[in-house]
Image (cartoon, helix red, strand yellow):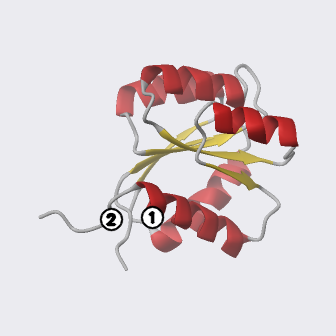
């Protein structure tokens, strides 16, 4: 099985969530992980690094996840974004999908399921074959 070697931008205002998701990602990727603690920082880091994938929290201070998603999508309409949240309301899920989010993961989901959801999204949206 090929490991995803791209760059992942993780945007979440909670340090323990960033640490947890980082550990989950290391199980099945060789990614370069960039972390942002709020949406404004996330947009700035997206602009600077153009990561392959963004994991984006919905509820954050300064700039919320949906607004951050809008700004990142404006920079790159092809960007791959997975939303992370502790509150999955149907309205937010639908809005995130309309804004281009590929997937939606609740933070209270068991670790194995979070890993599986991220992995499936990567496999569905990236070519993981070796290009040498």
The residue sitting at the bottom extreme is 1
Against 80, residue 118 (above or below) is: below
Return the residue nearer the eye: 51 or 116. 116
- For image coordinates 52% across by 26% down, the residue present is 72
Question: How far apart are labels 2 and 1 at the CA level?
Answer: 7 Å
Against 90, residue 121 (above or below) is: below
Against 123, residue 70 (above or below) is: above
Q: Are marks 2 and 1 in contact (CB under 8 Å)?
A: yes
- Residue 94 in view, yes or no: yes
- For image coordinates 51% across by 26% down, the residue present is 73
Position of 91 with respect to 3 (left or right) is right
Kindly indicate the quadrant of the structure image that contains residue 78: top left
Q: Earlier in the sequence, mark 2 or mark 1?
A: 1
**SS for tag 2?**
loop
Image mark for residue 23: none
- Residue of label 2: 128
- For image coordinates 37% across by 33% down, the residue present is 49
- Residue of label 1: 123
**SS for tag 1?**
helix
**Residue 92 percent across, percent down from the top left:** 80, 36
């Amino acid at each position: 099985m090929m490991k995803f070697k791209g760059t992942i931008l993780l945007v979440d205002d909670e340090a323990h969530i960033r640490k947890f998701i980082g550990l989950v990602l290391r199980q099945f990727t060789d990614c370069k992980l960039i972390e942002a603690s709020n949406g404004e920082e996330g947009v700035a880091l997206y602009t600077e690094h153009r990561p392959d994938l963004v994991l984006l929290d919905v509820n954050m201070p300064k700039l919320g996840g949906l607004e951050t998603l809008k700004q990142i999508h404006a920079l790159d309409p092809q960007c791959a974004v997975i939303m992370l949240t502790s509150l999955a309301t149907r309205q937010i899920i639908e809005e995130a999908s309309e804004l281009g989010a590929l997937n939606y993961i609740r933070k209270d989901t068991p670790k194995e399921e979070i890993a599986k959801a991220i992995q499936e999204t990567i496999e569905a949206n990236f070519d993981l074959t070796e290009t040498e």
